[in-house]
Image: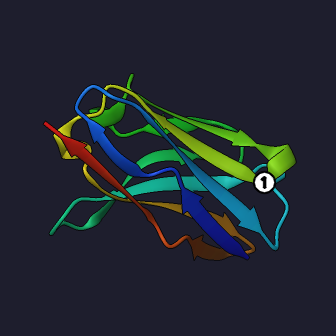
Amino acid sequence: VQLVESGGGLVQAGGSLRLSCRASGTTFVQPDLRWYHQAPGKEREWVAIRSSNGAIEYKDSVKDRFTMSVDITWNTAYLQMNNLKPDDTGIYYCQLHASSRDYWGQGTQVTVSS
C-alpha cells in the first residue's frame, strides 16, 4: 500500500488549499483514514479522523474550517482547508489503517503567510 499526498503550497492567511491523498495497492471500501499536521519543531497531531463507519471527527482548532472527504472511485482522500491561519503551517500527512497496519504518505508542505 502506498499513499501519496499532494496539494500543499504557499498561501496567505485566509486562503484555501485542498490536499489530496491517493492510495494504491488497496481499495477503499470504508477506509479508516486520518490527516495529521506536523508544525515546525512540534510533534505530529491528528486534525481529522474518518472511522470505518464513515464518521468524521475534527480537532477543535480546525472545526468549521477543514473538511475531510473520500472519493472511493479514485481511492483518494481530500482535506479541504479554508480560512487558513499561520498556525496551520507545517507538513500534512495522511494515514490509512488497513489490515491491522498503519500506512503513511510522505507528506505535503503547507505554508501560510500572515
Question: Is the residue 53 above or below the residue 4 in the image?
Answer: above
Residue at 81% from the left image edge and 55% from the top image edge: 28
The image quadrant where one finds the N terminus is: bottom right
How are the residues colored? rainbow
Q: Which amino acid is tagged 1?
A: Asn
Would residue 39 be found to the left or right of residue 20 on screen?
A: left
Q: Total number of numbered labels?
A: 1
Seen in the picture, residue 14 relative to 112 is either above or below; the reply is above
Image coordinates for residue 93, horizontal then vertical, percent: 46, 62
Q: Which residue position holds label 1?
A: 75
Q: Report x, y in % for residue 78.
A: 60, 43
Task: Tell me: 70 left or right of 106.
Answer: right
Residue visible at 47% across and 44% down?
48
Secondary element under disc 1, as helix, strand or loop, is: loop
The answer to whether 58 appears left or right of 43 in the picture is: right
Q: Is residue 15 left or right of residue 75?
A: left
Name the image quarter holding the C terminus. Answer: top left
Q: Position of residue 62 (x, y in %)?
A: 33, 34
In-front residue for pair 95/99: 95
Residue 103 versus residue 20 in the image, above or below: below
On the image, the x and y values in percent for residue 23 come to 72, 63
Residue at the image point whose x is 22% and y is 35% from the top: 85
Q: Residue at x 39, y 22 (%)?
A: 64
As drawn, the residue found furthest toward the top would be 64
Q: Determine crowd level at label 1: few under 14, some 14-19, many 20+ residues with C-alpha closer than 10 A.
A: some
Up/down of 5 relative to 20, above or below:
below
